Image (cartoon, grey):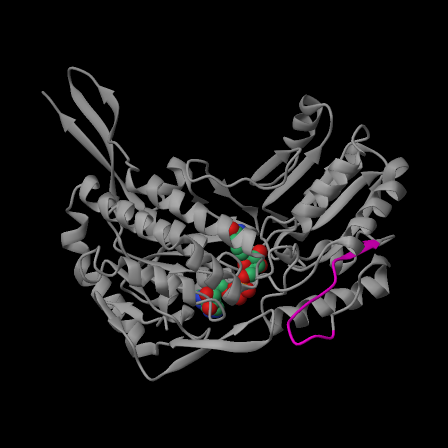
């Protein structure tokens, strides 16, 4: 049987304190893992601090090499990781395989990532250059929707830039992160990589600890605000990737069945539990009825079930707290709109909610304004493009938005008027380690991935040399 120890100061630690890990498709615990307390978390931070001077003075090559080996080890165990990910998270197995595959690619990418010094002035009098230095201990705090991918794309850029790190998975999805730690244990000097679980009670310790130099956090906007507050005591660097309320805007030349299917897929992927899922759809008033009917038809025919079944398209909601939250949005949908597909929490042992399409709902309903993070999609009509742009820009969120049209130039013109970190044309969502990703407004602070994201794990240092 596999075991899931903590990784602290280079040691794999099994302890009596256990966390039950529940399969959301059955509602039953299927294994346990070690769970840390505040003392163990402190030990991890201390170990990371002690490891920093030696690790940060190594070359980029030496720091990147273990990441390539980690990628290879994960590649060998790909299918087992995917099965475990589906068990702990609930996602359909095809999506879990996709996530593990991305992690292999990301680890390879970061194994060769570099930031070169930049000369800004070179004259007879002086040489001015910009350098990048690691920060120290990075706290990587992760959510439960893409547990392995998000842990990896925080850990890898942290260590390749010369930092050490403490990675904390969400309490309901600790296993694949702990297993990644197990694969990494003998690859890095003691203390460089630490993986510490909690009962959703140690995040604040990380974000307020004076020996943590930066917090890279992915999670809800509410918790992100707490992280920002806690980090202020020592002016820690922060990167916050938070919630979204992404809109898909269909233009008047785009009403095909294919678009309805693509919009549905991007809204209901992972049962809507994706930061960049489509959270509301806008269609021209003339096309509104047809689009609602198409989305409802897809929603009623899609296969819901245990993610371990190969033909499942929609898996469970990840945890009971989230079921409760989405149940609240179903109640709002019943009160404020008209449900034309789904609408119920399934009476089964797992945590399932029918894919739900809601029409004739007011723009000011909380289902439209808030992040539902579940399979309940409001569809709204619009009269003019100016109206819909204004409405979408009124949101306090600004993660991403998409515009769908046969005329991509027209769509891009509309897209560039939207105030969000990303705008996608004829797709919704895009992830690639070389491409920066950021949220506008209350969807986040800072950048992940791309050269811009890599720099966020460093402090800029200016070097000015007078030659005369
Ligand atoms: P959450 O905010 O409840 O928890 C995220 C992490 O923060 C967990 O590891 C949790 O233990 C930890 N935490 C809890 N309290 C803390 C505190 N006071 N200080 C520090 N850490 C603390 O989020 P969740 O429910 O796990 O994830 C869902 C949310 O994440 C959604 O809002 C979603 O949009 C967002 N999300 C955003 C992105 C993105 O890139 N923008 C990606 C994935 C998820």
Residue 161 location, quadrant: top left
Q: Toward the viewer: 99 or 40?
A: 99
Residue 220 visible in this rendered orientation of the protein: no
Q: What is the x, y in percent for residue 378? A: 78, 52
Q: Residue furthest bottom?
A: 16
Q: Residue furthest top?
A: 124
* In-image side of 397 versus 463 (left or right): right
Q: Name the residue: 67% across, 22% down.
A: 409
Q: Name the residue: 36% across, 66% down.
A: 206
* In-image side of 163 versus 313 (left or right): left
Q: What is the x, y in percent for residue 407? A: 72, 23
Q: Toward the viewer: 100 or 358?
A: 100
Q: What is the x, y in percent for residue 184? A: 27, 57
351 drawn magenta: yes
Magenta stretch: dominant secondary structure: loop
* In-image side of 48 versus 414 (left or right): left
Q: Residue furthest left?
A: 468
Q: Considering only vertical position in the picture, is 56 above or below 452? A: below
In the picture, which quadrant includes the N terminus? bottom left
Q: Name the residue: 52% across, 74% down.
A: 22
Residue 208 visible in this rendered orientation of the protein: yes
In the picture, which quadrant includes the C terminus? top left
Q: Considering only vertical position in the picture, is 440 above or below 213? A: above
Q: Considering only vertical position in the picture, is 335 above or below 129? A: below
- The span shown in magenta is 347-358
Q: Toward the viewer: 201 or 28?
A: 28
* In-image side of 289 versus 172 (left or right): right
421 drawn magenta: no
Residue 222 location, quadrant: bottom right
Q: What is the x, y in percent for residue 231? A: 39, 61
């Amino acid at each position: 049987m596999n075991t899931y120890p903590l990784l602290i100061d280079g040691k794999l630690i099994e302890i009596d304190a256990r966390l039950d890990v529940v399969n959301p498709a059955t509602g039953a615990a299927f294994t346990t893992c070690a769970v840390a307390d505040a003392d163990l978390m402190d030990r991890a931070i201390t170990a990371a601090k002690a490891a920093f001077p030696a690790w940060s003075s190594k070359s980029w090559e030496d720091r990147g090499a273990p990441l390539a080996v980690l990628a290879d080890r994960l590649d060998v165990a790909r299918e087992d990781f995917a099965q475990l990910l589906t068990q702990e998270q609930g996602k359909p197995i095809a999506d879990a395989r996709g996530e593990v595959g991305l992690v292999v690619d990301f680890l390879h990418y970061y194994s060769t990532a570099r930031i070169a010094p930049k000369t800004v002035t070179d004259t007879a009098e002086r040489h001015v250059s910009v350098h990048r230095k690691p920060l120290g201990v990075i706290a990587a705090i992760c959510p439960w929707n893409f547990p392995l991918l998000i842990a990896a794309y925080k850990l890898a850029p942290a260590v390749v830039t010369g930092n050490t790190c403490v990675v904390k998975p969400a309490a309901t999805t600790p296993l694949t992160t702990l297993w990644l730690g197990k694969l990494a244990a003998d690859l890095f000097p003691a203390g460089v990589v630490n993986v510490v679980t909690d009962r959703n009670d140690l995040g604040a310790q990380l974000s307020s600890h004076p020996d943590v130099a930066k917090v890279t956090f992915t999670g809800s906007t509410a918790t992100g605000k707490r992280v920002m507050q806690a980090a202020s005591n020592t002016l820690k660097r922060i990167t916050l990737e938070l919630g979204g309320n992404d809109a898909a805007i269909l233009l008047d030349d785009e009403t095909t069945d294919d678009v309805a299917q693509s919009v549905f897929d991007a809204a209901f992927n992972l049962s809507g539990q994706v930061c960049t899922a489509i959270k509301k759809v806008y269609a021209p008033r003339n096309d509104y009825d047809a689009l609602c009917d198409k989305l409802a038809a897809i929603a009623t025919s899609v296969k819901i079930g245990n993610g371990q079944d190969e033909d499942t398209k929609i898996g469970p909601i990840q945890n009971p707290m989230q079921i409760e939250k989405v149940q609240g949005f179903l109640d709002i949908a019943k009160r404020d709109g008209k449900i034309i597909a789904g609408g119920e929490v399934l009476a089964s042992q797992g945590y399932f909610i029918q894919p739900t399409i809601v029409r004739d709902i007011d723009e000011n309903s909380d289902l439209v304004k808030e992040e539902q993070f579940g399979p309940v999609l409001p569809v709204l009509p619009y009269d003019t493009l100016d109206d819909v742009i204004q409405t979408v820009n009124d949101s306090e969120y600004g993660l991403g938005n998409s515009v769908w049209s046969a005329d991509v130039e027209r769509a891009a013109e509309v897209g560039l008027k939207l105030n969000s970190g990303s705008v996608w044309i004829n797709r919704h969502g895009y992830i690639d380690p070389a491409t920066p990703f950021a949220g506008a407004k209350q969807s986040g602070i800072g950048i992940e991935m791309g050269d811009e994201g890599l720099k966020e794990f460093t402090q800029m240092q200016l070097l000015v040399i007078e030659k005369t």
